[in-house]
Image: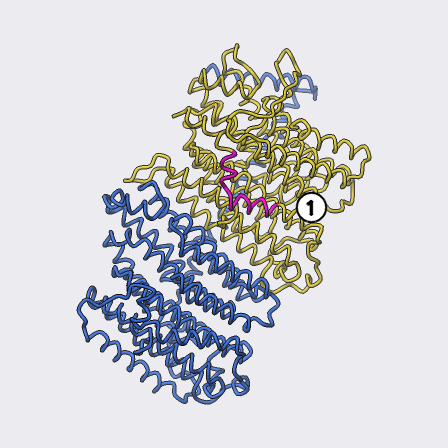
Amino acid sequence: MLLVVSGVGSLIHIYSLGYMRDDEGKSRYFAALSLFMFAMLGIVLANNFVMMFIFWELVGFTSYVLIGHWFERDAAADAAKKAFLTTRIGDFGFMIGILMVWMATGSVVFDDIVAHLSKITSNPGYLTIVAILIFCGAVGKSAQFPLHVWLPDAMEGPTPVSALIHAATMVAAGVYLLVRVAFLIQASQTALLVIAWIGTITALLGALMATQQSDIKRILAYSTISQLGYMVMAVGLASNEAAMFHLFTHAFFKALLFLAAGSVIVTLHHEQDIRKMGGLAKKLRITFATFAVGALALVGCPPFSGFFSKDAILALAYERNMSIFVIGLTTAFLTAFYVSRAVIVVFLGKPRSDAARAGKESPLVMIIPLLILALFALIAGWETVAKNFLVVPHEKESVITVPALALVALILGVGIATWLYRNRERDPLHVDLVRRRFYIDEFYEWLIGATQELLARIAAFFDRWIIDAGAVRGTSGGMFGLGAFLRLFQVGNLQAYAFLFGLGIVALIYFTIFR
Amino acid sequence: MLLFLVLCPITAAIAIIAGAPARLTALVAAISNLFVTLALLSRFDRVTAGFQFASSFLVSADWQIHFAFGIDGLSLLMLLLATIVTVAAVWFTGKIDNHERAFYACLLFISGGAIGAFASIDLFFFYAFHELALIPTFLLIGIWGTGNRSVAAWKITIYLTLGSFVLLIGLILLYQSLPATTRTFDIRELQAATAAHAIAAPTQRHIYLLLLIGFGVLISLFPFHSWAPEAYASAPAPAAMLHAGVLKKFGLYGLLRLAIPMLPDGAHYWMYLLVILLLGNIIYIGLVTIAQKRLDWMLGYSSVMHMGYIFLGIASANILGATGAAALIFAHGLSIALLFAVAGQIRNRTGTLLFDDLGGLAKVMPFAGLAFGFAAFAAIGLPGFANFASEILIFFGAIRNGWEMQRFHIFQIATVLALWGIVISTVYMLRAYRSTFMGTINERWGKLVDLGTGLRLPVVLLVAGLIWFGFFPQTLVRMVTPTFRPYFTATK
């Protein structure tokens, strides 16, 4: 994990030099990016919950700053806010989980908790609640359903940021957390089941939504959600190795895909709509080649890295839970479909805009990181390479069915996409429900409007007109009234008032002490 | 040294009225006070629990009232807060058009009064200094305020005077409740006396309730809060900084100093009430804050809301919670002062604080955006700022109370709701930041100027305080634990 963060991180710093060359806020950008690296390494190295939570929040903060880098754009400003808020909701559960662990075991240090684990496991209901609460943190950070909505919007940030934070490292931190606390989670079957299903649903939903996007970065964002779903699924199937393995390979090929997409975007003067691209393979040869490597790794084509890690997860699902396996396989098919769609529409066919006709290759400082990442995207899954960095999972009985089925899904997906999109001017497939992302964002907006906003308005109204106007002004009005009434008896004599005042105090003292 | 600390701002205020150059004198007084406090800090002995640097002058032999000062870790923390915020507030006071002298004099009186209250170890002066600080606050709002200032000034005056009056009754009863031979105004002896002959539980209940309401009004405890947002919105920025940052904390200081150690049974008896009220602060006021449409009202309500967290620390009645409460008093004081300062600067430039009118200001005022961002993220408890360190102590302290693995009791529910309050505060703070500093800029503000270099120093001072104690909270924790340890070991 350390290697992923610092390796991919430094490549992206180099790439940013080119990407952000002309930006006004360059110093702010690099400051935040470096702070992010600090915080992310902090998460990886933390040995207790509190330190982890601290860095966890800090990466959220840097992510906020970097998404909102172009703060004068309304979309970027809204996206930054949404990202921070959504992850905070997850962190709410995470913090309660931490507090509950601390109360039960008296420690927040992982090793001590392991030593006192029996204090939690002796109470299964408690254990399940704790595990699920901690999982909440991962749901927010790793953009799992139902808190996935922030990640696509986060694509408003600069592309290197999307590559580093919202593909390779920060979003994977949730998975890393789950692996870190696996000793807790794996003690509860219920929690495992919940986690596995959340991961599965996320993988499917993400892939479905990716098929209908027209913004190149959003396609990749939904793909990230879907791949993170795979990792969480693996955690839920109680295999840390498979989850970390996929995290490892995914970091390389997804960062590669984002950076290659960034190269396309820069060439086209920050155009991100794939309908305005096309035919770029001839103009951006290296970008195309590297994007293709990333794409092949993502769809899980042997011998690229994604094949091995995805295969490990699918084999696991095949062994432990058939229905999850079927959905996982469907997702693999959808992945092949949307990736092929993107490649075909962006790079093949005829150029569909002037910018696409005039495109030329990006500068060397951006190309070199692409090449290095492409190399890793190819070899990171090979056992000879990967075993130097982490434990490579082995399928217990090597079933040939799984890779075979995966390959069938792959070929099917690529085939259908080619048939549908090759040389088409328009999108032949238009599913409104999917394009609108199942109306989840709209639903949340409605939900927030119906609950929080409504409550806030009621509370504000109450505060203004009942507590303030009613009680306070009413009391003061009453005082004036009383004063007017008393004026009938008193003649504005100061000594008399002071006397009454003192009498009141004496009475008060008398009643409180002696009664 | 303590005497100097108290008298310096008051003398300077008198000198300003008499004709000394206003801004210069005020700044010199404020800065020299900060240095004196730092000197105290360096010479302060962190191990002993008692009051240090004590000095005493007999004022009234009949009543045994002493003009007596002394500090322990808690009061030192309050002094540090008061002096830092005073420097910032005086510095942020720009050109005042009418009665400039009186304005600066009022600021210094507030500062002197607050410092006097925090440093006093005589009950009489503890109360009297606070009253001294209140009056200039009313004047600042009534004379130099903006918007609906006379209503706001009247409201805060009536409200806080009533609060102090209830408090006075409570203090008198506290004094009366001890056997005649041990009656004293000396807080040290009071503590010893209450520890030795504990006040009967029923009496404690009456007194604690009076103190809770009296201090509670001063701190804007729900439902006695409605003076706060209106007063802060109308007050000139330096007045809001000093009151929200420092003077309001007098009530919390009073609870920690008097009510908790002297009336443990009373505190225990009213615990449920306090928890419910503080949840009103956190959840209900939090929601009200979300609905605000003006930056200054939003900040006013947010400061009311954050009092709930400090109350939660106090209510949990253990050393973790109390330490967290003391730390949050400090952290919140610095962050809210910075927020009001920046908001005041924006109001000076634009004449409006309506969210609908603002937007995209970070483009023309990048430094103001940065400063506000720091303070806003500190306020919503981002790690690295002192607020987070304090809040996490409070949460750890609160959830421990009455813990059972099988079910949640009131403190666990309160902790969970308070954690949800953090989400609420994120909502309103980010929304405010979004609509003030981010997004497309209104054309009217294309030519606004950023904070000048002269104003950057106080910002740096406040942010440095927040970050220092955010990264090294143990310095702060070690300062106050000797004060609290005897409280909670004695009761258990």
Name the residue type under label 1: Phe
Seen at 52% across and 61% down, the residue is A34
Q: Which stretch is magenta?
A: B462-479
Residue A33 position in % (x across, y down): 51, 62
Pick whichever, A194 or B366, lies toward us: B366
Left or right, B160 with reference to B267: right
Left or right, B240 with reference to A396: right
Residue carrying label 1: B92
Residue A304 position in % (x across, y down): 33, 77
Residue B32 position in % (x across, y down): 70, 36
Residue B137 appears in which quarter of the rendering? top right
Q: Is residue B137 above or below residue B382?
A: above
Query: Is B471 a magenta residue?
Result: yes
- Dot 1 falls on a residue whose secondary structure is helix
Rendered colour, chain B:
yellow
Residue B129 position in % (x across, y down): 64, 27
Query: Is A271 a magenta residue?
Result: no
